[in-house]
Amino acid sequence: MSRAYARWGPEEYSTTRPHTGVIHFRDGVDIRVTDLPGIYEGANEDITKGRRVLRQTYRAKVLCYVLDMSNSDMFTGGRDAVADLEMLRKETNAYTEFNEAKPWMVIGTKCDMLHRDTLFNLDSLHFRTKARYGTDVPVVGTSARFGLGIERVVSTIRQLLYPDLILPLDRVLAGPMEKILIPQWDQFREQQLIAAGAGTEPPRLTKRSKQRPRRSN
């Protein structure tokens, strides 16, 4: 999402310290994003030094919970993604009461690993999250390997952070194709008058007469 470089890998808890980057938009809006290490259950009680990670959420305006979709199938002995989401919500809200009122979203990673039913797990997470927390919670699937879903995550973060800055674009109604492809005589005449000057006739092209050389007697 940004130009910040950090060490990351396919294994869990590969991020060991916070990494901060800035997302620059064309209209001048800048959003600072911080990648935090993963936390365990009981992080609010400083288990595995979880409070050092949770204190970074104090200044955050939007919370993004990242879940692994390749290991979220509870029917095959994996972890339940909704249970992990509830654990993350519980720990962040228990650290400070301000986190409960902040807008948040869910990001599913490793959605390209189709042999582990990641799309099925993502759909299950989507509908179960909507049923528990309402339809206002965005759930976005991503793939860091192929760069899928990154633009949607960025646009969702901006919409949650600055909902008033994203304005719908009004479509311009197109005219008939004949007027676009084949210009009419009135349009051609107006262009000639504009090129020659308002209120004056366009210059006319005159044929030059070819004079034959005279023969001397």
Image (tube, rainbow, N blue to C red):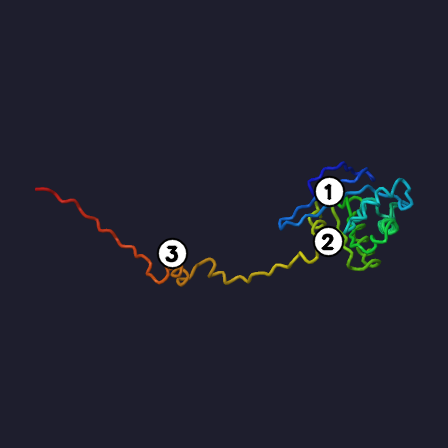
Q: Which of 22 and 8 is in front in this view?
A: 22
Q: How far apart are marks 2 and 3 (CA)?
A: 50 Å
Q: What element carries label 2?
A: helix
Q: Mark 2 points at which residue?
A: 161
Position of the C terminus, as image quadrant, is top left
Q: Distance between the residues labelled 2 and 1?
A: 23 Å
Residue 204 appears at what percent x and percent y?
30, 57
Under mark 3, the amino acid is Ala
- When asked about the image quadrant of residue 192, the answer is bottom left
> CB atoms at circles 1 and 3 under 8 Å apart?
no
Under mark 2, the amino acid is Leu
Residue 205 appears at what percent x and percent y?
29, 55
Residue 31 appears at what percent x and percent y?
70, 48
| Relative side of 3 to 55, left or right | left
Residue 149 appears at what percent x and percent y?
71, 48
Under mark 1, the amino acid is Ala
Position of the N terminus, as image quadrant, is top right
Q: Mark 1 points at which residue?
A: 144
Q: Which of marks 2 and 1 is nearer the N terminus?
A: 1
Q: Residues within 10 Å of mark 2 (few under 14, many from 20)?
A: some
Picture disc at residue 195: 3
Q: Is mark 1 on a helix, strand or loop?
A: loop
Q: Distance between the residues labelled 1 and 3?
A: 55 Å
Q: What element carries label 3?
A: helix
Outermost residue, front side:
59
Q: Which of 80 and 102 is in front in this view?
A: 102
